[in-house]
Image (spheres, grey):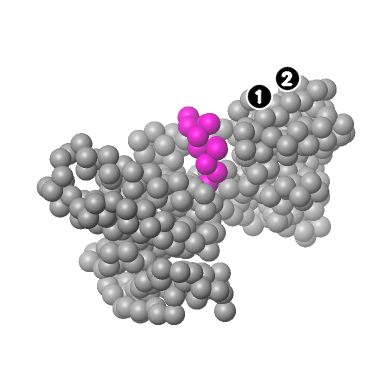
Amino acid sequence: MSMKLRCKMNQKEADKIAAFLTNVSDRLLFHIPLYEIGKAFDIPREKILDIFIQGVYDGVFILEWIYHCPTCGHVVYEAPSLQQASSQNFCTVCNKVFNNTLDTNIEVCFSIHPRLKTLDPAFKLNYIAEMGKSIQNGKYRTWDTPDAIKGVEIIQNNLYRELMRSEVLIGDQVLPLKNATILFAEVTNSTKLYASLDDRKTFSLLKEYTCILSDTIEKCGGVSVKTIGAAVMGAFIDPGKAFNAAVKALRYLMKHTQNKPIQEQLEIKIGLHSGSMLAVTLNNRLDYVGLTVNTVVDIKDTALPNEIVISEALFNNRSVKRAILSVTDTVQKQQIRFKGNPDNHTLYHIKIQNQSRKNR
C-alpha cells in the first residue's frame, strides 16, 4: 500500500506519518492512534489532527463518530458523519437512556480508507468484544484516555470547519457541550462611525477590524464561530487560550489604530465566559447557543472601551489567573444581575497595560 498525505502548513510531518503508516500492521490502521503517533514523532496534537482531517478530505482515511455509554463506556451507536448525529441513546448494558455530550462521551476515530486497504471485519468485532469484556470485569470507560479524540476536538478544528462545511447537524438536531469558553468582542460606536463616514468606508473599516479579531482567535487555538455586524464570537476548549486570544487581539488592535486618522481609531470591548452550551446548525454552519452564550454578550456590554471582562468561572481558572498577572496588576471586581437572568454574577474587569509583564 502506498500513501500520500498533504498538509499545507505541516508537509514534513505529513510525509513522516505517511511513511510510517505505509509499513505498519493492518491492526494499527483500524482506529489509528493519532496522538500516540504524534508523541512518537514529536508532532503537536493540533498539527497531527489537521494532517488526518486533510487525509479524510483527500480520501486517505475515514472518520467515525462513536457514541459511548457515559456510565460503562459501551459502544451504543456509530455514525460516519456528523449529519447522522444522535442526541440520545439507550445502553443495553446499563439498561438506561442517556444524552450524548460532545466533550464527554462522543469519540472520533480515524481508520484507513477501504479504497486503499480493506481491513478484516474482525478488528471491529474484537474492539467491541474487548470493551465488553472490560465492562464485565468492572473496568468502565476504558476508551476514555488522554489520547482519545473527543467530538468537541473535531468541531473545534478550523480545518475541519473549512474543508467539511457540509458536516453540520441536520434540522433541529443538537449536541450539548459540558464546558467551553466563549469570547465575544465588539467594535464600539459602529453606529456613530456610519454617521461620520460614508457607508462603504465604514463597512470596509469594520470588516478590517473583525477580520483581525477572527484571525487572532484562530491563531490562538479557537474557532471564529461567526461575525454579527461589528462583533465576533469565538469558541475555545482551553480557557487559558481564550484569555490569551483576548489580550493579543486587544493589544494588536490598539497598535493597529495608532497610524490611522483619528476618526478611524476604533476601540473594542471583550467579554469571556465558560459553561455548558448546545452545538447547533445556524445559517448552514456549526454554531453555539444557550445561556452561556447569551451571558457572555451581557458580560461584554459591561466592558469599557479597550477592556476585557471575564466571569468568575474563568477568573478562578489557574492558567487564566497566571495570564492576568502577566498583563496587569489591577483587576476590578463587580457584582451584577443581568436583566432577564435571575443569577448574580461576579465579573472581573481587566485593563491591559501597553507592555506585557513577566509572569510572577
- Residue 12 % position (x, y): 73, 37
What is the secondary structure assignment of the residue under circle 1? Answer: loop
Q: Between residues 344 and 359, which one lies in front from this camera angle?
A: 359
In the rendered structure, does residue 243 fall within the stretch colored magenta? no
Q: Between residues 177 and 59, which one lies in front from this camera angle?
A: 59
Residue found farthest to the left: 195
Stretch in magenta: 156-167
- Residue 243 % position (x, y): 47, 63
Q: Between residues 90 and 170, which one lies in front from this camera angle?
A: 170
What is the secondary structure assignment of the residue under circle 2? Answer: loop
Q: Mark 2 or mark 1, which is nearer the start of the sequence?
A: 1
Report if residue 179 is visible in the image: no
Left or right? Give the position of 104 relative to 119.
left
Q: Which residue is mark 2?
A: 115
- Residue 217 % position (x, y): 46, 51
Left or right? Give the position of 183 relative to 294.
right
Residue 193 vs 198, above or below: the answer is: below
The quarter in which the C terminus is drawn is bottom right
Kindly indicate whether the residue at mark 2 contacts the one at mark 1 (C-beta within 8 angstroms): yes
Residue 315 vs 230, above or below: the answer is: below
Camera-nearest label, 1 or 2: 1
Q: Residue at x 55, y 48 (%)?
A: 152
Task: Choose top left, top right, bottom left or bottom right for residue 319.
Answer: bottom right
- The residue type indicated by label 1 comes to Gly
In the rendered structure, does residue 159 fall within the stretch colored magenta? yes
The quarter in which the N terminus is drawn is top right
Q: Which residue is mark 1?
A: 59
